[in-house]
């Protein structure tokens, strides 16, 4: 898998007190998932994911392989019709689909899967994944666009259209098999809020950890815990911040490679924060590269800012490679077209800072 910079396995820094926080956040996440799977609620009928699913006019009665292949064949056209970003289409900027008050880029990308395993474990499938968002509180709000938030910014979301369709087909088949004597079945609006959006929390949570790390490294206070559910979750904010401050102290007082720095910081559902350096396996054309760079921009800025003696100290090759990608693909011209005025200015200033190390 391609990475933003060279990742050399250096071993994860162990913080004994992190294990309690990690297990606790994992339990909190699982409790949220189970609650919404067992207590059906709905998203609005005009939600982006509802409209996307309803636009897939492939009969569920086809065998699994044929159904999946047919959806995959039309996914590029569907993505374009829904104004999603992909390797063949720049797409449009959305707002408040998943994170209220935030601008959002929604990328279409198809992963290779084992169909038999996917159908068997349809409840656990993650067709929608968060690769950037602005939230730093650990309240685990469902990212459905209606949650109570104190932070806004830019979010980047990846949607696997064939996998989403496959999960919905399995859901419908389960509903048909288990429906009561009155014939009542759950709706697509319920499906999205029972499975698709709750399953986004796994990727959401680890990026919350990064956002808290980034804020603390700049002497800013992360957002306070906000209760988001009809039940109480244990707040692990203090334990998390204690570990992150130790990690910041370690990496800011040593001359480290980007690889070593990011592997020092722990994560919840990943071994460490090095997962942020991975780029999705897709054709990285100019149509989609602008979105991928925006997704990785906070990580790049964090690494540049935290590096003792400046990022060029032992990372000049990595710095040059990152800046070259930005320059060669002329992404700033794409940003000017795709982004709103204030967001474009903010991103332009960040790129100017990054390019100053080239």
Image: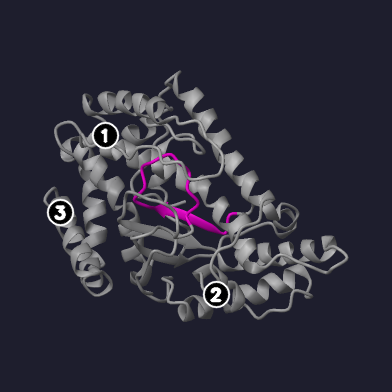
Tell me, for residue 51, which label it has, or none.
2
* First in residue order: circle 2 vs circle 1: 2
Is residue 135 shown in magenta?
A: yes
Foreground mark, 1 or 3?
A: 1
Image: 205 above or below 217: below
SS of the residue at dot 1? helix
Report if residue 283 is visible in the image: no
SS of the residue at dot 2? helix
Q: Which residues are magenta?
A: 126-143
Q: Are marks 1 and 3 in contact (CB under 8 Å)?
A: no
| Marks 2 and 1, how far apart at CA | 39 Å
Residue under label 1: 216
Is residue 104 shown in magenta?
A: no
Foreground mark, 2 or 3?
A: 2
Tell me, for residue 355, which label it has, or none.
3
Question: Is residue 234 left or right of 95 when viewed as pictured?
Answer: right
Residue at 26% x, 30% y: name it: 256
Q: Residues within 10 Å of mark 2 (few under 14, many from 20)?
A: some
């Amino acid at each position: 898998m391609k990475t933003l910079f060279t990742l050399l396995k250096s071993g994860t820094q162990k913080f004994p007190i992190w294990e309690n926080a990690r297990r606790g956040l994992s339990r909190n996440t699982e409790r949220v998932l189970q609650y919404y799977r067992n207590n059906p609620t709905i998203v609005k009928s005009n939600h982006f994911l509802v409209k996307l699913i309803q636009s897939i006019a492939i009969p569920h009665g086809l065998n699994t392989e044929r159904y999946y292949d047919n959806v995959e064949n039309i996914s590029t056209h569907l993505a374009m019709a829904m104004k999603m970003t992909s390797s063949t289409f720049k797409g449009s900027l959305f707002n408040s689909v998943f994170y209220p008050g935030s601008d959002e880029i929604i990328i279409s990308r198809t992963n290779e899967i084992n169909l038999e395993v996917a159908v068997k474990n349809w409840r656990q499938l993650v067709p929608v994944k968060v690769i950037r968002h602005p939230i730093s509180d650990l309240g685990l709000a469902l990212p459905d666009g209606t949650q109570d938030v104190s932070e806004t910014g830019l979010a980047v979301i990846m949607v696997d259209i064939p996998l989403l369709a496959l999960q919905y087909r399995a859901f419908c088949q389960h509903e048909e098999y288990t429906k009561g004597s009155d014939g009542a079945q759950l709706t697509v609006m319920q499906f999205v809020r029972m499975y698709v959006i709750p399953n986004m929390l796994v990727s959401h949570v680890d990026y919350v950890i990064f956002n808290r790390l980034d804020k603390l490294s700049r002497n800013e206070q992360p957002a306070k815990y906000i209760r988001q559910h009809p039940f109480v979750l244990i707040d692990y904010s203090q334990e998390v911040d204690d570990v992150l401050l130790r990690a910041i102290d370690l990496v800011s007082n040593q001359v480290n490679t980007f690889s070593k720095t990011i592997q020092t910081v722990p994560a919840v559902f990943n071994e460490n924060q090095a997962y942020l350096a991975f780029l999705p396996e897709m054709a990285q054309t100019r149509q989609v590269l602008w979105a991928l760079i925006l997704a990785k921009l906070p990580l790049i800025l964090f690494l540049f800012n935290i590096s003792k003696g400046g990022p060029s100290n032992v990372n000049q090759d990595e710095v040059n490679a990152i800046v070259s990608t930005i320059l060669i693909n002329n992404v700033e011209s794409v940003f000017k077209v795709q982004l709103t005025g204030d967001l474009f200015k903010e991103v332009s200033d960040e790129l100017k800072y990054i390019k100053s190390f080239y």
